[in-house]
């Protein structure tokens, strides 16, 4: 039952912010239309669903699509986002973006970033080195191409 505000009017329903962050997977267009796939899924993995995953032992989750690091600020709780959901599910580090990113430059960024991670750098070190490489490349030095990426975690 919804409560009433000080003017005796119904208070708005507050939707869980973890249901507003998610990843669109195969079949998401059906899920948005309210239809389920034959296996019962809707093609959308919400941050709330991520919380139910067991990601203990996962060193890095990469969310390289646009604005994957953005979430809702909740007073006393911090930011509810995909980042937070993956960390709470057990991922040690999460790479995400704070704004829209360009496909071609993101591809280059990910190639450089993962080369460093696979060669032993921590995600934080790989991020810093990749950003510095972009900064020193006259074709990639615009912050639009490298500054949106952030790593949270250990």
Image (cartoon, helix red, strand yellow):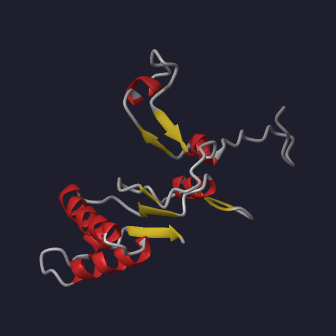
Kindly identify the residue that appears in the image at 61 percent across and 52 percent down.
89
* Residue 127 relative to residue 93: left or right: left
- Image coordinates for residue 75, horizontal then vertical, percent: 72, 63
- Image coordinates for residue 12, horizontal then vertical, percent: 72, 40
Number of marks in the rendered image: 0
Kindly identify the residue that appears in the image at 50 percent across and 24 percent down.
41
Which residue is most to the left? 139
Quadrant, the N terminus: top right
The image quadrant that residue 20 belongs to is: top right
* Residue 99 relative to residue 69: left or right: left
- For the residue pair 115 and 45, the one nearer the viewer reads as 115
Quadrant, the C terminus: bottom right
- Image coordinates for residue 44, horizontal then vertical, percent: 47, 34
The image quadrant that residue 101 belongs to is: bottom left
- For the residue pair 145 and 37, the one nearer the viewer reads as 37
- For the residue pair 137 and 34, the one nearer the viewer reads as 137
* Residue 152 relative to residue 62: left or right: right
The image quadrant that residue 148 belongs to is: bottom left
Kindly identify the residue that appears in the image at 51 percent across and 68 percent down.
152
* As drawn, 154 above or below 100: below
- Image coordinates for residue 84, horizontal then vertical, percent: 58, 58
């Amino acid at each position: 039952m919804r409560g009433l505000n000080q003017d005796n009017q119904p208070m708005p329903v507050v939707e869980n912010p973890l249901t507003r962050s998610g990843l669109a997977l195969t079949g998401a267009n059906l899920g948005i239309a309210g239809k389920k796939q034959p296996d019962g899924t809707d093609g959308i993995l919400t941050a709330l669903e991520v919380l139910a995953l067991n990601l203990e032992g996962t060193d890095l989750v990469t969310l390289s699509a646009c604005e994957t690091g953005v979430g809702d600020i909740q007073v006393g709780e911090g930011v509810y986002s995909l980042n937070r959901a993956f960390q709470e599910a057990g991922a040690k580090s999460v790479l995400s973006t704070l704004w829209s990113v360009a496909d071609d430059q993101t591809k280059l960024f990910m190639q450089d970033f993962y080369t460093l991670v696979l060669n032993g750098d921590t995600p934080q070190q790989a991020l810093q080195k990749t950003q510095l490489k972009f900064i020193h490349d006259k074709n990639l030095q615009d912050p639009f191409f490298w500054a949106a990426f952030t790593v949270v975690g250990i």
